[in-house]
Image: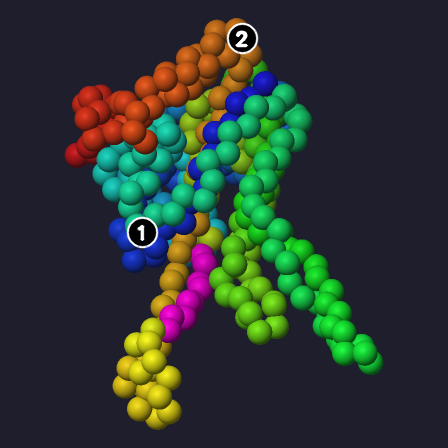
């Protein structure tokens, strides 16, 4: 079985958001038992002893490169390094960025599935919109609605080999409402999808980035009564438009569970986090965390 932790979040493009990522790819994986890896693409992590044939895509950028503008993949080795600070796991990242206005956590799904079995989690809502509106000869209005799913859908199929490498088939979709034309009832949505197959070692974290989003919101403000005066009313009201560009990041960490000890280790970590939850801060990850939990990269 495989226990999978994921974190999906948006980051403002103006924020200095650097990740300690090792960019590695494999042209020919050679022989990894349990897989037919003739020309498969894969990614290895730092300190993990990546499979033979690996080469660095960006020489000289093995620490803290910034994601390029397009769709990209990287592997985080021991811990997750963001802006020079290393966090032990995804839970620590969530607690560190949840108060940051430039970072919006969309979802933190956690899945447990069997080897080679597909697992799906969907978090969202159904948005109604008008598809047809008409009035009968008797002046009765008839309106037809349809519904559109908006939210986060994550589908993962893991495959485990004897060396605790995990191949993940990932299909992710994030859709949000960016504008709604209330006069016609038609919502405008932004959809970002990623579909890929990756290979990663047990307990390492893969990150997918470069899924850009661009949205704008309008705002109106006026002084009551004075803003309604013809012509002169413009002196007492303002209109504004705000444009926002964000980058979508997806972190995925697989935990291979082959023995009772593996299951107990995952259970103990989660139980400790739940029991120590106080005032919205998990002990060990909050402001009073001990030194080893979060370390500064020199």
Q: Is mark 2 in CB contact (under 8 Å) with mark 1?
A: no
Toward which corner of the image does residue 272 lie, by quadrant? top left
Q: Position of residue 218 (x, y in %)?
A: 41, 71
Q: Which mark is residue 125?
A: none
198 horizontally vs 11: left or right: right
Q: Residue furthest bottom?
A: 231
Q: Which residues are magenta?
A: 212-220
Q: Position of residue 186 (x, y in %)?
A: 61, 67
Q: Quadrant of the C terminus?
A: top left
Q: Is residue 113 magenta?
A: no
Q: Is residue 144 above or below residue 249?
A: below
Residue 166 visible in the picture: no
Q: Which residue is mark 2?
A: 259
Q: How is the image coloured?
A: rainbow
Q: Which residue is mark 1?
A: 102
Q: Position of residue 122 (x, y in %)?
A: 59, 40
Pointer 1 local density, CA inside 10 Å: few below 14, some 14–19, many at least 20: some
234 horizontally vs 71: left or right: left
């Amino acid at each position: 079985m495989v226990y999978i932790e994921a974190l999906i979040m948006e980051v403002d493009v103006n924020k200095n958001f650097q990740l300690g990522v090792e960019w590695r790819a494999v042209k020919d994986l050679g022989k990894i038992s349990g897989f037919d890896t003739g020309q498969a693409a894969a990614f290895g992590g730092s300190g993990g002893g990546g499979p033979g044939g690996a080469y660095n895509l960006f020489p000289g950028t093995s620490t803290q490169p910034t994601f390029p503008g397009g769709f990209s993949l990287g592997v985080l080795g021991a811990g997750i390094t963001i802006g020079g600070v290393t966090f032990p796991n995804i839970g620590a990242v969530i607690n560190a960025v949840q108060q940051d206005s430039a970072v919006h956590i969309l979802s933190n799904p956690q899945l447990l599935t069997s080897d080679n079995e597909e697992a799906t989690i969907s978090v969202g809502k159904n948005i109604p919109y008008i598809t047809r509106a008409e009035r009968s000869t008797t002046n009765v209005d008839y309106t037809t609605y349809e519904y559109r799913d908006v939210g986060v859908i994550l589908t993962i199929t893991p495959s485990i080999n004897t060396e605790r490498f995990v191949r993940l088939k990932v299909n992710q979709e994030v859709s949000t409402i960016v504008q709604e034309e209330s006069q016609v009832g038609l919502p405008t949505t932004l959809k970002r999808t990623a579909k890929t197959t990756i290979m990663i070692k047990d307990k390492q974290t893969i990150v997918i980035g470069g899924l850009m989003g661009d949205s704008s919101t309008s705002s109106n403000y006026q002084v009551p009564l004075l803003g309604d005066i013809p012509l002169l009313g413009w002196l007492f009201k303002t209109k504004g438009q705000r444009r926002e560009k964000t980058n979508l990041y997806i972190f995925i960490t697989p935990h291979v569970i082959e023995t009772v000890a593996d299951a107990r280790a995952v259970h103990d970590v989660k139980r400790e986090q739940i029991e120590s939850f106080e005032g919205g801060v998990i002990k060990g990850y909050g402001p009073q965390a001990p030194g080893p939990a979060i370390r500064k990269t020199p």
